[in-house]
Amino acid sequence: MKLHKEGTKILVITTILTILLSAGFYFGLASISIWLFAILELALIIFVVLIFRFFRVPKRSCPNEEGVIYAPADGKVVVIEDVEENEHLKEKRTQVSIFMSPLNVHVNYYPIAGEVSYTKYHPGKFLVAWHPKSSTENERSTVGFKTKSGVEIIMRQIAGAVARRIITYSNVGEYFSGGDQFGFIKFGSRIDIFLPTDAEILVNLEDKTVGSETPIARLK
């Protein structure tokens, strides 16, 4: 399993600090209390493993079945509802939202093949990602694209109370396949995807998703 390029700086700093802290624990505590030393070392190891695990990039293969929308991220479905998409399309859409905990893979994937038609970054608040207003008030990045059949879809990366950096690779005019990476959000977040209201939704609330592999909708 690979590590994501967005974690390079953090992982280097984490490794250096871990070595320094481990040495400090050894020279400062090992001779005083071997149990306290062992507990602190174990806590340090667990922390480092979690940081490295956060930036993992598992090998995925998107089925790319025609007309099927796959999950853009790992996580849990927290919203399925009809809403007004007021940023770009200005029309009613079915919103499906996936919440990513810090334990989930945080790579973001294109859910179907197409061409990028719109991108915009919005600064904002850092409400918890499942808060109803996080979709419109939090720091976020919106990507719009057209499928090969001409259907336009909107995706929105949303920062949360912990997530403080959104990375989006999309550029207007570029073509992509389902399963290609389009971004990364650091340390807990959410993705909203706005689908045509006549799309057949294939997931339910609380369902767990696997990015680029779980079908979440089928276009008419």
Image: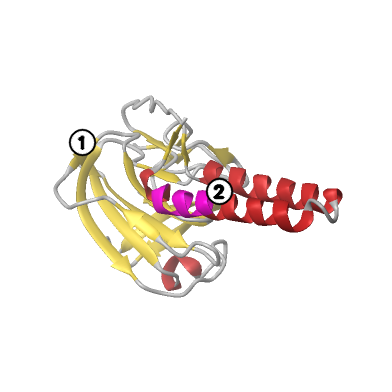
Which SS class for mark 2?
Answer: helix
Farthest left residue in view: 173
CA–CA distance in space, label 1 to label 2: 38 Å
Q: Name the residue under label 2.
A: 51
Residue type, mark 1 in image: Lys
Does residue 87 show up?
Answer: no
Comes first in the chain, label 1 or label 2: 2
Query: 190 left or right of 29?
Result: left
Q: Going 71% across and 54% down the picture, which residue do you hit?
A: 27
Instruction: Check residue 11 in the rendering and tell me which mark sits there, or answer none.
Output: none
The one nearer the camera, 3 or 61, is: 3
The one nearer the camera, 50 or 208, is: 50
Q: Going 49% across and 68% down the picture, which residue do you hit?
A: 134
Q: Give the range drawn in magenta.
A: 8-16
Which SS class for mark 1?
Answer: loop
Report x, y in % for residue 148: 20, 36
In the figure, 140 relative to 145: above or below? below
Quarter of the image for residue 177 reads top left
- Callout 1: 10 Å neighbours few (<14), some, many (20+)? some
Report x, y in % for residue 219: 35, 37
Query: 83 left or right of 160?
Result: left
Report x, y in % for residue 100: 54, 50
